[in-house]
Image (cartoon, rainbow, N blue to C red):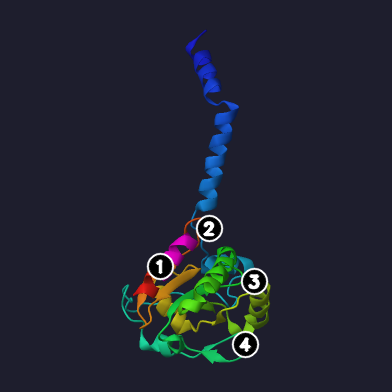
Amino acid sequence: MNSKQENQQATGHFWTPARLALTLLVLSLVAAGGLSSCTSSDEQTQRGVNQPGSPPARQPRAATAANSPLPASVLGARLQTVKGGTISLGDFSGKVMLVNLWATWCGPCRNEIPELVKIHREFQSKGFEIVGLSTENPASSAQSVKNFVQSFNMDYQVGWASQEVAISLMQITQRDAIPQSFIISRDGRVLKQFVGFNPIATPGQIRQAIEEALKG
């Protein structure tokens, strides 16, 4: 038997059915557990270039450091809600808050929101609130966002991020991808930021960050 045949035989012995199945399982878990997010180019692919509703392009401005207060312009901005009224992030002063930037067309957002619904129900009685802010154009997405809220049983505050609010929040992470979530302290400080969604790791990490904020 020559060396080539020996190598082929050794390779055949290495890739046994059990080892091949195990390798495929590991690769599938890696793929499933990866961090996923959407960008404005993803939205343009689905809706068509130059359609309204993309996450706003980041513009130069001073970044907000972690554990720094949110700018007054962000806390005080009146934001349109799916219920027809307006809210501001400052309305939730005294509570630990999770602010989530998302969109109906974003796959990872659709995967994350059921987890956020669970988290809201788990911590709401402890002085915690979630505010979900769509990055879509409220004029063109009003019905689709309302339908989405009903379909996903989103029982927390949902509205639209103004361009200034979305840009200011995204500047914290220096990323324009969604979903993005921000854990805000009772006194309006940014304690933790999450970009993208990992179905295995992210829910536990968010819960831990909320528990730490509630103790603070």
- Within 10 Å of disc 1 (Cα), the crowding (few <14, some 14-19, many 20+) is some
Q: Do the residues labelled 3 and 1 touch (CB within 8 Å)?
A: no
Residue where numbered disc 4 is placed: 83
Q: Name the residue under label 2.
A: 199
Q: Give the range drawn in magenta.
A: 202-211
Is 172 left, or right, of 176 in this rendering? Answer: left
Q: N-terminal of the two: label 1 or label 4?
A: 4
Mark 1: amino acid: Ala
Residue 102: in sight, yes or no?
Answer: no
Q: Which amino acid does label 2 sit on?
A: Pro
Q: Earlier in the sequence, mark 2 or mark 4?
A: 4
Q: Which mark is residue 152?
A: 3
Q: Identify the secondary structure beneath mark 3.
A: loop
What residue appears at the point 58 percent right and 75 percent down from the top-left corner? 50
Residue at 36 percent of width and 76 percent of height = 190
Nearest to viewer (mark 1 / mark 4):
1
